[in-house]
Amino acid sequence: LVLTIASERLELTRFTPLAPGRKKSFALASLLILSGAGLEALSPPAGIRLASAGFAALGFWLFFSDIARRTVRQQGLARFSAVCLLSGYFWLTVSGLVGLAAAPVESGFVYDAFLHSLFLGFVFSMVFGHAPIVLPAVMKIAVPYRPRFYFHWLLLQASLLARLAGDAMGSAAFRRWGALGNAAALALFFLSTFWAVRQGRQAKL
């Protein structure tokens, strides 16, 4: 998931020429992730640290190289998508730093922070930002942008921060409330997207 998303974003950098060496640093970060995944079978702590270094490096690379740093200055869907992407890169970096600091992350609070900053913070921020663009292109379903889209994005970010705060404090109760907020953010995303699709269909009638 990480490399697929990152590669798609790399392709879009053709609209913003990269400084010399930037593509090499992208390739190095990707190589760290792949090498860490292979090494993890032999030495879990070393493999996770190597892959985590790749996550952190790739998140940093994307945050400072992606076209979203420009489109975030625009309005409407372009800005919303950019906000989602930049927050996702932040969470990818956080996941990498957690893995670097606390490998092996196999269970407990550290595992929770590592896993959810990656799959909720990064992957679902990407989903939030791309859904209004990808669904019309792939499924021919109109998803008109609505400012309310920021609600599910904001709820995901706030609840994930609460969840990681609970992990850092070793508080199961705090983590539980964060998890409920995570679930509510995903539910709100699906409902808001469905509502936007329905409004788009009604507008065509």
Image: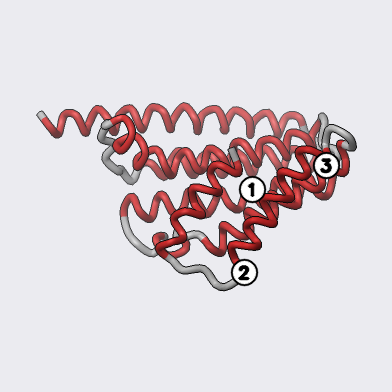
Residue nearest the viewer, comparing 28 with 88: 28
The answer to which of marks 2 and 1 sits earlier in the sequence is: 2
* Residue occupying the point 63% across, 34% down: 178
- Residue 47 got which mark? 3
| Residue type for callout 1 | Leu
Spatial separation of the CA atoms under disc 3 and disc 1:
17 Å
Q: What residue does disc 2 label?
A: 21
Where in the figure is residue 20, as x and y percent of width and height? 58, 72
* Residue occupying the point 49% across, 30% down: 186
| Residue type for callout 2 | Gly
Work out whether 108 lies above or below 162: above
Residue nearest the viewer, comparing 98 with 1: 1
| Residue type for callout 3 | Gly
Q: What residue does disc 1 label?
A: 92
Where in the figure is residue 89, as x and y percent of width and height? 58, 52
Work out whether 66 lies above or below 91: below
Q: Quadrant of residue 172?
A: top right
Q: Quadrant of residue 169?
A: top right
The answer to which of marks 2 and 3 sits earlier in the sequence is: 2
Q: Quadrant of the N terminus?
A: top right
Q: Horizontally, is 86 left or right of 44 in the view?
A: left
Where in the figure is residue 131, as x and y percent of width and height? 39, 38
Q: Nearer the viewer, mark 2 or mark 3?
A: 2
Label pair 2/1, CB-CB below 8 angstroms: no
Q: Horizontally, is 126 left or right of 97 in the view?
A: left
Instruction: Farthest residue to the left: give it.
Output: 205
The answer to which of marks 3 and 1 sits earlier in the sequence is: 3
